[in-house]
Amino acid sequence: MRPVILAIESSCDETSASVITNGKVLNNIIATQAVHQKYGGVVPELASRAHQQNIVAVVDEALQKSGLNKTDLDAVAFTRGPGLMGALLVGVSFAKGLALALDIPLIEVNHMQAHVLAHFIGPSQPSFPFLCLTVSGGHTQIVLVKDYLDMEVIGQTQDDAVGEAFDKAAKVMGLPYPGGPLIDKYAQQGNANAYKFSQTSMPGLDFSFSGIKTQFLYFLRDEKLKNPNFVEENVADISASLQQHLVNMLLTRLIQASEQTGIRDIAIAGGVSANSGLRNSLKAVGEKKGWRIFIPAFEYCTDNAGMIAMAAHYKFLKGEFSALDVTPLARMPI
Ligand code: KG4
Ligand code: ZN
């Protein structure tokens, strides 16, 4: 069942490896780096070091679980960018070493394209053209997906990513990193209409999340002056209100994008697509608007090598290989 490709992801704080045969992802091994928790965010130096420690074991496990050997591989794929330079270097160097040793081609993958292509791992797949809202700790973009490897960003954040807004809001509430999933958890018990926040207006299909971060900080400061236990006593309502506000910002733009393009196959991708508020609101809006909604399985929402493998498969079919002097890119357009 060719091609057999080993894919490696190391752009941020997950070290991951996956084996794909003839377009079918066989496994998706992920080593999450707990080391960042106590710092309240990803520390780039520590991420690089943890990738170095984890990469051999993660690759070995992916190969072993696939029942294949290194010599069965037709290509090695890696995330070229965007991401943390030191973290990317670990995956790129490892992939190069393996490709050189086995004398097989090297395939570079764009991490943001891969988040979109995660939709082709499972049985429910969108049709081209479709729109994908990619929402993570580093990105917030609306992508017009014309084909597997032909994508255009038609709206994006001009400052912070929405995942960053979740995480920074959680941090000022005193919650551990990454706070996005915790806000989601508390929000499920809260009243989303308890507190109101205002939106910064942005042109076209673009987003801005830096304003809400400051607004939220001042809101908590003022409330804590009145009641020092404000956060502890109202964590569910605060989480639900903030989450609904962020989700509304995302959906407003997605509705506009669908109306402008006439596209009604709508997908979400990236870590924040795990958010239950976003999933539920998207389904509700989708029903009203007659959209077909696509949400990846949880393990393919956050960073993973399965999606890198899927992207690599399409690149292999097109014969898009990289030279051995390829270098990582911290910024890499889709
Ligand atoms: O895609 P991802 O794993 O890594 C990046 O490329 O950034 O996304 C991580 C982001 C973090 O900001 C995390 O807080 C957020 O996704 N996240 C969530 C949820 N699960 C992960 N945010 C809100 N609700 C969730 N359930
Ligand atoms: Zn990502």
Image: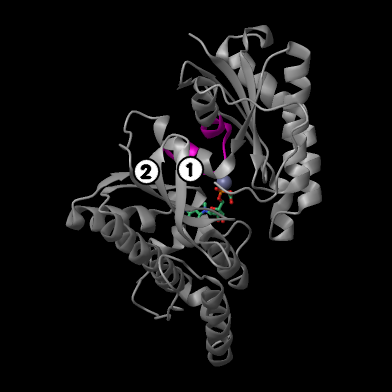
Quick check: is the Cβ at mark 1 less than 8 Å away from ligand 1? yes
Quadrant of the rendered structure where residue 58 is? top right
Task: Say whether residue 297 is left or right of residue 66.
Answer: left
User: Which residue is painted at 53% across and 58% down in the image?
Assistant: 180
Question: Toward the viewer: 312 or 244?
Answer: 312
Asked if residue 16 is positioned above or below residue 142 in the image, the reply reads above
Indicate the position of residue 108 as horizontal and vertical percent values.
63, 32
* Residue 47 visible from this viewpoint: no
User: Which residue is painted at 40% across and 71% down in the image?
Assistant: 245
User: Which residue is painted at 55% across and 89% down in the image?
Assistant: 222
Residue under pointer 2: 295
Type of amino acid under label 1? Cys
Indicate the position of residue 153 as horizontal and vertical percent values.
47, 53
Residue 297 within the magenta-colored segment of the rendering: yes
Badge 2 vs badge 1, beta-carbon distance below 8 Å:
yes
Indicate the position of residue 211 as horizontal and vertical percent values.
54, 77
Task: Say whether residue 295 is left or right of residue 149.
Answer: left
The residues tagged by marks 2 and 1 sit, at their Cα atoms, a distance apart of: 8 Å
Type of amino acid under label 2? Ile
Question: Toward the viewer: 261 or 244?
Answer: 261
